[in-house]
Amino acid sequence: MNMLERKQEKQQHLKNNIMKLNSKKDKRLKIRKRIRSKLFGTSSVPRLAVFRSNNEIYAQIINDEKGQTLFSSTSLSSKKEKLTKTEMAKRVGAEISDKALKKGIKKVVFDRGGFVYHGRIKALADSARENGLKF
Protein backbone atom coordinates (compact mmCIF):
# COMPACT_ATOMS: atom_id res chain seq x y z
CA MET A 1 0.00 0.00 0.00
CA ASN A 2 1.54 3.26 -1.02
CA MET A 3 1.42 6.56 0.84
CA LEU A 4 -1.52 7.98 -1.13
CA GLU A 5 -3.70 4.92 -0.52
CA ARG A 6 -2.94 5.02 3.21
CA LYS A 7 -3.82 8.70 3.37
CA GLN A 8 -7.12 8.14 1.54
CA GLU A 9 -7.98 5.22 3.79
CA LYS A 10 -7.27 7.29 6.90
CA GLN A 11 -9.42 10.16 5.61
CA GLN A 12 -12.29 7.76 4.88
CA HIS A 13 -11.98 6.25 8.36
CA LEU A 14 -12.09 9.71 9.98
CA LYS A 15 -15.06 10.73 7.85
CA ASN A 16 -17.04 7.65 8.92
CA ASN A 17 -16.22 8.00 12.62
CA ILE A 18 -16.75 11.72 13.14
CA MET A 19 -19.42 12.23 15.78
CA LYS A 20 -22.40 14.08 14.40
CA LEU A 21 -23.42 17.19 16.25
CA ASN A 22 -26.75 16.61 17.94
CA SER A 23 -29.50 19.13 17.55
CA LYS A 24 -31.31 20.56 20.55
CA LYS A 25 -34.27 18.29 19.85
CA ASP A 26 -32.04 15.19 19.65
CA LYS A 27 -30.51 16.03 23.03
CA ARG A 28 -33.95 16.53 24.58
CA LEU A 29 -35.19 13.22 23.17
CA LYS A 30 -32.13 11.45 24.59
CA ILE A 31 -32.84 12.94 28.03
CA ARG A 32 -36.54 12.05 27.65
CA LYS A 33 -35.66 8.44 26.90
CA ARG A 34 -33.46 8.28 30.01
CA ILE A 35 -36.23 9.77 32.16
CA ARG A 36 -38.89 7.42 30.75
CA SER A 37 -36.76 4.39 31.56
CA LYS A 38 -37.11 5.30 35.25
CA LEU A 39 -40.73 6.57 35.36
CA PHE A 40 -43.80 4.39 35.07
CA GLY A 41 -47.41 5.36 35.68
CA THR A 42 -49.79 2.85 37.24
CA SER A 43 -53.55 2.96 37.74
CA SER A 44 -53.11 4.11 41.35
CA VAL A 45 -50.24 6.54 40.60
CA PRO A 46 -50.44 7.64 36.94
CA ARG A 47 -47.85 9.69 35.06
CA LEU A 48 -48.31 13.42 34.43
CA ALA A 49 -46.56 13.97 31.09
CA VAL A 50 -45.80 17.50 29.87
CA PHE A 51 -44.95 18.68 26.36
CA ARG A 52 -43.93 22.25 25.58
CA SER A 53 -43.85 23.72 22.10
CA ASN A 54 -42.81 27.26 21.22
CA ASN A 55 -46.34 28.60 21.67
CA GLU A 56 -48.36 25.99 23.54
CA ILE A 57 -48.12 23.59 26.47
CA TYR A 58 -49.81 20.22 26.82
CA ALA A 59 -50.32 17.96 29.85
CA GLN A 60 -51.65 14.39 29.99
CA ILE A 61 -52.30 11.97 32.80
CA ILE A 62 -51.36 8.50 31.56
CA ASN A 63 -51.78 4.96 32.89
CA ASP A 64 -48.75 3.13 31.46
CA GLU A 65 -50.00 -0.30 32.55
CA LYS A 66 -52.87 -0.08 30.04
CA GLY A 67 -51.14 2.37 27.70
CA GLN A 68 -54.09 4.70 28.10
CA THR A 69 -54.37 8.47 28.40
CA LEU A 70 -56.88 9.13 31.15
CA PHE A 71 -57.34 12.82 30.35
CA SER A 72 -55.45 15.82 29.05
CA SER A 73 -55.38 19.59 29.12
CA THR A 74 -53.85 22.10 26.71
CA SER A 75 -53.28 25.81 26.41
CA LEU A 76 -55.19 25.78 23.12
CA SER A 77 -58.48 26.10 25.01
CA SER A 78 -57.51 29.49 26.47
CA LYS A 79 -56.30 31.04 23.20
CA LYS A 80 -59.01 33.70 23.09
CA GLU A 81 -57.70 35.44 26.18
CA LYS A 82 -54.53 37.51 26.21
CA LEU A 83 -52.29 35.54 28.56
CA THR A 84 -48.55 35.09 28.73
CA LYS A 85 -47.15 31.61 28.10
CA THR A 86 -46.37 31.18 31.79
CA GLU A 87 -49.92 32.16 32.77
CA MET A 88 -51.26 29.63 30.25
CA ALA A 89 -49.01 26.96 31.79
CA LYS A 90 -50.37 27.78 35.25
CA ARG A 91 -53.92 27.48 33.95
CA VAL A 92 -53.17 24.11 32.31
CA GLY A 93 -51.65 22.86 35.60
CA ALA A 94 -54.75 23.93 37.49
CA GLU A 95 -57.06 22.30 34.91
CA ILE A 96 -55.22 18.98 34.90
CA SER A 97 -55.13 18.81 38.70
CA ASP A 98 -58.85 19.59 38.92
CA LYS A 99 -59.62 16.80 36.44
CA ALA A 100 -57.40 14.39 38.37
CA LEU A 101 -58.96 15.21 41.72
CA LYS A 102 -62.48 14.74 40.28
CA LYS A 103 -61.45 11.24 39.14
CA GLY A 104 -60.00 10.47 42.58
CA ILE A 105 -56.33 10.72 41.60
CA LYS A 106 -54.35 12.53 44.29
CA LYS A 107 -50.80 11.39 43.52
CA VAL A 108 -48.96 11.28 40.19
CA VAL A 109 -45.44 10.79 38.83
CA PHE A 110 -44.20 13.96 37.08
CA ASP A 111 -42.63 13.46 33.65
CA ARG A 112 -41.04 16.67 32.37
CA GLY A 113 -40.46 15.09 28.98
CA GLY A 114 -36.79 16.00 28.71
CA PHE A 115 -37.46 19.70 29.20
CA VAL A 116 -35.55 21.66 31.83
CA TYR A 117 -37.55 22.07 35.06
CA HIS A 118 -37.72 25.84 34.72
CA GLY A 119 -40.10 28.47 33.42
CA ARG A 120 -43.35 27.10 31.96
CA ILE A 121 -42.70 23.50 33.06
CA LYS A 122 -42.12 24.66 36.64
CA ALA A 123 -45.16 26.96 36.52
CA LEU A 124 -47.37 24.07 35.42
CA ALA A 125 -45.99 21.79 38.14
CA ASP A 126 -46.35 24.42 40.88
CA SER A 127 -49.91 25.19 39.82
CA ALA A 128 -50.85 21.49 39.87
CA ARG A 129 -49.33 21.16 43.37
CA GLU A 130 -51.16 24.24 44.64
CA ASN A 131 -54.47 22.73 43.49
CA GLY A 132 -53.92 19.55 45.49
CA LEU A 133 -52.02 17.15 43.23
CA LYS A 134 -49.07 15.45 44.93
CA PHE A 135 -45.81 14.48 43.23
Image (cartoon, rainbow, N blue to C red):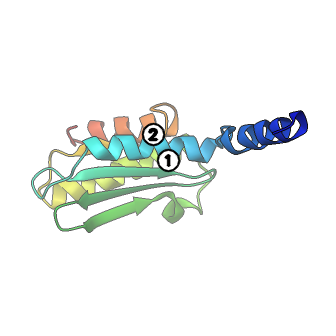
Q: Is residue 25 left or right of residue 6?
A: left
In the rendered image, the quadrant that contains the N terminus is top right
Q: Is residue 70 visible?
A: yes
- Residue 82 spot, x, y in % from top left: 62, 52
> In the rendered structure, are the residues bearing label 2 and label 1 in contact, judged by CB atoms less than 8 Å apart?
yes
Question: Label 2 belongs to which residue?
Answer: 31
How far across and down, in percent of the image, does residue 134 sit? Answer: 20, 38
The answer to whether 123 appears left or right of 46 in the picture is: right
Q: Does 57 appear above or below 28? A: below
Going by the image, does 121 lie left or right of 61?
A: right
Instruction: Give the quadrant of residue 128.
Output: top left
Nearer to the camera, 47 or 88 = 47
Residue type beneath disc 1: Leu
The answer to whether 76 is drawn above or below residue 115 in the figure is below
Q: Quadrant of residue 109?
A: top left
Label disc, if present, on residue 29 of the rendered structure = 1
Query: At 50% from the left edge and 57% from the top edge, which residue is drawn?
Result: 75
